Amino acid sequence: MKPPVKDLRRPYISTQFHRELIPRGSVVETFLFYSGQLEFSLTDYERFVLAHTTRPPLHEFWACINDDASRVYEILTSDIFKFDNENMFEILQETWPTYPNPYVRSALFFLMNVCSEKGLPSSGNLNITNFNKHSLNRLKTYKKPSNLFITLDKEQELIDSIIETNPTDFLVFPLPSYDYNLFDHGTSVGFEETRVNHARLLRKLSAIDKKWIVSYPHHEGAQELYKGFEQIMIDKYGKKTNSAEACEELIIVNF
Amino acid sequence: MGQRVNIQYSIDIDELPSAVATLLEGAITDLTDVAHDASGDINKITVMELNTLQEIQQIRTNLESIDHRLGDVAALVNSYINYHTNSAQPQEQEEAHAPEATNSEQLFSPLQGQTTTTDLDNLQSQIERFREVIAATPEDSNEATS
């Protein structure tokens, strides 16, 4: 099943390769849960996924559609929910979390996700063509997989969500991007985003005695940071490549 | 600006759009008046006098009053949207859901629920059930090509 929302910050072409690394029947913890593109590809093929997020708006969206996706669909298709201009889109990017009803907020989350060129409700330019029958139908027919459990962590730092003693087989980190964390204090992130300190994540993972998989959109900085670990470059067809130029996604594993 | 008070009276739900439109029109008309009154010639010689401060204060007071009224209109429209989105659901299903948040401090509280001990017990039993099902079913040989 395809999830109803998308993450356009990074490609998800290594999903099949993740399944080759994670045997059927495994229990997997994923972090920075957002669109579920990787998680659903695992649950579809008989892996149990415990997905972590630290962002309440994201958790609420998934809780609402897991509870009653048709209710969110009804709101989006009702007469009072007309949406047709750029000015309104920009206002909603700043105000959507302030709407009092959680199902309305979830409808707005969906709307802003599919209409944002970045796939982020709080940023990106308007592209209304993706808000169509097809995207709405994916929401209408959505059913939560029985082998997916989504948890909201109170910790603001990603690394604090990592509990080594959890009874799981793999830790998986599909990171949206790599940066050098030079301007973290001068930039803001959207309601739905989590800031990641990549060096601190690596330090935490290095001290863990558990199998983990980290993936990034291809970035030389990430390759340099994880020097000494097994690195696998994936091309646009989802296959292994030795060419950095052809590399779209970088996967790093400790096993 | 004088002290503001909340007043309350009821009208038929069908009359609400018209009442809200009247409120909004009033606020926008006043906004136009404020802009019009403020758009006179500004004298470079006398602008740095006390009179200017008084005029600016008057404009700001008027804008504050308009802002309050626009806030009231926004709250009414939000309530109307809430009413419609809730009334689409059957009553018993509605009661099963958590109550709605009413202010920004409560945002995300109804469904966010920090994962509780009960949830973790549920998770444990889900994982056990999952392992049992996997052990009892043969592997799908087509997985790698899907």
Image (cartoon, coloured by chain):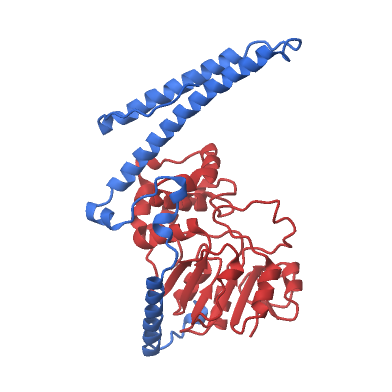
Chain colours: A red, B blue
Please identify the quadrant where the N terminus of chain A is shown. bottom left
Q: Relative to residue B45, is residue A84 drawn left or right?
A: left
Q: Residue at x 61, y 72 (%)?
A: A237
In this view, the residue in front, A69 or B94, is: B94
In this view, the residue in front, B113 or A201, is: B113
Residue B54 in percent (x, y) is at: 62, 15
Answer whether residue A234 is visible to the viewer in this image: no
Q: Residue at x 76, y 10 (%)?
A: B45
Q: Residue at x 43, y 22 (%)?
A: B25
Please identify the quadrant where the C terminus of chain A is shown. bottom right
In this view, the residue in front, A141 or A159, is: A159
Q: Relative to residue A251, is residue B6 drawn left or right?
A: left
Does A194 appear above or below A246? above
Q: State the image quarter where residue B42 is shown.
A: top right
Answer whether residue A7 is visible to the viewer in this image: yes
Residue B120 in percent (x, y) is at: 41, 74
Q: Relative to residue B98, is residue A134 drawn left or right?
A: right
Residue B93 in percent (x, y) is at: 26, 56
Q: State the image quarter where residue A201 is shown.
A: bottom right
Residue A246 in percent (x, y) is at: 71, 70
Q: Relative to residue B70, is residue A158 drawn left or right?
A: right
Does A74 appear above or below B145? above
Q: Residue furthest front?
A: B3
Q: How many marks?
A: 0
In this view, the residue in front, B58 or A57, is: B58
Does A186 appear above or below B38? below
